[in-house]
Image (cartoon, rainbow, N blue to C red):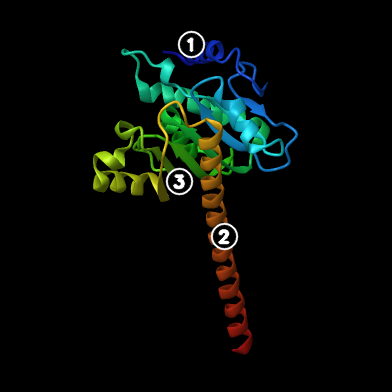
Amino acid sequence: MSTKRVLETQEKLMANWPGTPLDRAGIVRILNTEGTKPPLLWIFNSAKEPQLLADALGPDQPLIFSRSAHLLVSPEDDRLFIRKLLGDYLLDEISRSFGGQKFDAGTSCQGASLVMYLADKSDRKTFEIGSMCLINSRLPQIATGCPALLIYGSGDPGHDPFRENMEEAAAKASVCYSEYERILLDAQHGGYYSEEILANILSQFQSFRSERSAKGWAGRLQVLRQWAGTLRSKGAA
């Protein structure tokens, strides 16, 4: 499948999605455009999910989003190649509006490999992804270097690699993420964007993000203290 065909197919699949398009094809969109917080990037699987998340986040939180690649792949297609085509396009288009910025990202189910690809390939020349929230997702073999909150539902045991083999899943997650936390919610496939479950997910993710931010500030403070100590030592000498 060519890049042109991938984009044309995704454009048709997202033709009736909400949000303001950021690209000509309309496959990169944004909601809560007046928000003042750093944007949040999300990959969805269905048209109803973006508005549900945007409403739960509130008007001050801009939400950049696109769609997963799962319906683009037929049996004869190379799944990894299509993910690369779509991922590289999203990198370029998001960078046009948000180049040099750093923001957090999330997805559910089939969108994990695309979000992780973006986290792996993005850098300061494009945009940076900080913490990630991955809901009911497998563990694609991509070393993102990012911290991740992994959320699974008790009603989806078949989608939770930790319930299949805890040690193997932990080993894979240690490669995929700089650090991770796994949380099990009373939820199942198709219900993660319901009002109650979504509120719980966002609360958990906010706590996770805040902890990472606090660690970052503590690390920078430690570096400054060491630097100041070095200057004092040189002055005393």
Query: What residue is at 55 percent from the left and 46 percent from the top?
Result: 203
- Of labels 3 and 1, earlier in sequence is 1
Q: In which quarter of the image is residue 196?
A: top right
- Are there few (<14), some (14-19), or many (20+) residues within 10 Å of tag 2? few
Query: For the view shown, which residue lies furthest in the bottom direction?
Result: 236
Q: Looking at the picture, how far across and down is residue 189, in whole percent?
A: 41, 28
- The image quadrant where one finds the N terminus is top left
Label 2: which residue? Answer: 214
Name the element at disc 3: strand
- Are there few (<14), some (14-19), or many (20+) residues within 10 Å of tag 3? many
Foreground residue among 96 and 35: 35
Foreground residue among 84 and 66: 66
Which amino acid does the dot numbered 1 rest on? Answer: Arg
Report the disc number at residue 5: 1
Which amino acid does the dot numbered 2 rest on? Answer: Ala
Report the disc number at residue 148: 3
